[in-house]
Image (cartoon, grey):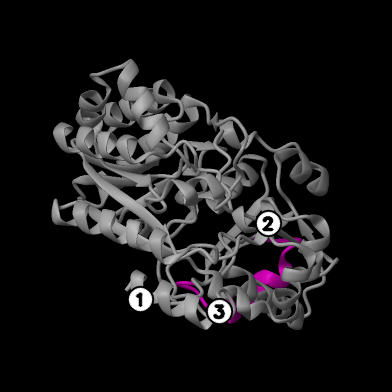
Amino acid sequence: MSFLLIQPAEPHRGGQVYLPGGLLNLAGRLIAADQKVTVIDLNLDRLERYTKVLLESSIVCITVLGKPYIPGTIDLIRQIRATGFEGQILIGGQAVECMLPARFNGFFGSEVTRVCSDEQLNEVLNLDLPNRYKAGMELALAQLHPQRRRRYLTNEFGLWLSNGCSQDCSYCDALNGVPEKYRHLEALKQEVRYVCDELCQFGHDRLEMYLTNLDGFQTPKRLEAAMQAIHKIASAHGLEVRVRCLSTVAFFNKAIRKDGQLLERLRGYGLRIVAFGADGADPRVWARENKRHNTLKGLHTALEDCLDAGIDPEILMVIGFNDDDLQSMRCALREALYWADRGVVIRPYVGKPILKKLDEHDLVPYLDDPTKLLSLDYAGLASRVTHPSRRQRYMVNTTYL
């Protein structure tokens, strides 16, 4: 079979280029199974240039990274069908893996297939593809034009290490409330080794990565093993390693209490930034959003430990949920300003509705007009769609800005 794999265009700014790791992992597995694969990135490519490839393809696969990508993907499917392509279209990615089938059909239609697991993918394709946790993207990268590889790899790129998070925070669109599952270390090593070989060919001197773990410190031994392997391979190539990751305050502090030298070792392996999901500074908000593992004392301890270890901490500060009051936003603002004054980077976001948690009534406006999903971007202001109350909108946007 022949496959066309598509990375949709970034919905807001357009042309923002980043390595589509999940798509390339799939491409690598298809290539390993002797399938013909073409990968296009609509941040760099135009679909019209690939009409011949499209019409010669058996199956089209599209990845949908987040909610704001859904309207563009719906339009993309229309464009694909308008070319006369009658084959199967598969949709995967974080935005749809937690979506109920009826909701998926409401957005994309029943003729498009949602794929959320290796087992489902193999069943749909009638293939026996390598397990994604035991595979890498090196075969797919090798198929790309050298300039495309350079574009992807010489900037910071997302390195997939694991799926899942045992925390069950309400404000999370990803697969949470389940144990973290790591990919096989040998597959990771092979992938990193290929990347380092390419960086040397490009004359580049750094390996810069963002670890895609939802919480990097929930399984600290696995994190350290991966970091140690990455550093060993990069050092053998003469490359500096710079890594950043996410963490909850609770798992970070638990890991450091159990192993007081862990941060020092991780910094030696290249860990440079840890971003903590604070999401306010009010215990009432944390209780409501199922983040009871957060405490101000715990947050302060984690930030101080990072600073002492020479690792740059960042605070992800989601504020302005519809149920937040002025007191909760003042708490968040006061906390953010205090740490910003100490040189800590604050990354503010506005609390928007979580698609997988909307009831049927609240979902209707988005099904009727999927472009409203663009307003759910965390980095955007509160709008009439996300915050119907004018007073709440004003309060949230004033605090955010």
Asked which secondary structure carries label 2, the reply is: helix
Residue at 43%, 56% (x, y): give it.
19
Of residues 98 and 189, the one drawn nearer to the viewer in this rendering? 98
Q: Earlier in the sequence, mark 2 or mark 3?
A: 2
Of residues 206 and 380, the one drawn nearer to the viewer in this rendering? 380
Q: Is residue 180 above or below residue 7?
A: above
Image quarter in which the C terminus is found:
bottom left
Q: How many marks?
A: 3
- Tell me the number on the disc at residue 389: 3
Q: Earlier in the sequence, mark 2 or mark 1?
A: 2
Q: Which residue is the site of mark 2?
A: 357
Q: Is residue 68 above or below residue 200?
A: below
Of residues 196 and 280, the one drawn nearer to the viewer in this rendering? 280
The kind of residue on which mark 1 rests is Thr
Question: Where is residue 370, by image quadrant?
Answer: bottom right
Q: Is residue 369 magenta?
A: no
The kind of residue on which mark 3 rests is Ser
Distance from label 2 to label 1 (Cα)?
Answer: 26 Å
Asked which secondary structure carries label 1, the reply is: helix
Distance from label 2 to label 3 (Cα)?
Answer: 20 Å
Q: Nearer the viewer, mark 2 or mark 1?
A: 1
Classify residue 85 as left or right of residue 178.
right
Q: Which residue is the site of mark 1?
A: 398
The magenta stretch spans which residues? 43-62
**Badges 2 and 3: C-beta atoms under 8 Å apart?**
no
Q: Is residue 61 magenta?
A: yes
Q: Position of residue 314 (x, y in %)?
A: 28, 49
Q: Nearer the viewer, mark 2 or mark 3?
A: 3
How would you rate the neighbour count of disc 2 (Cα within 10 Å): few for under 14, some for 14-19, many for 20 or more?
Answer: some
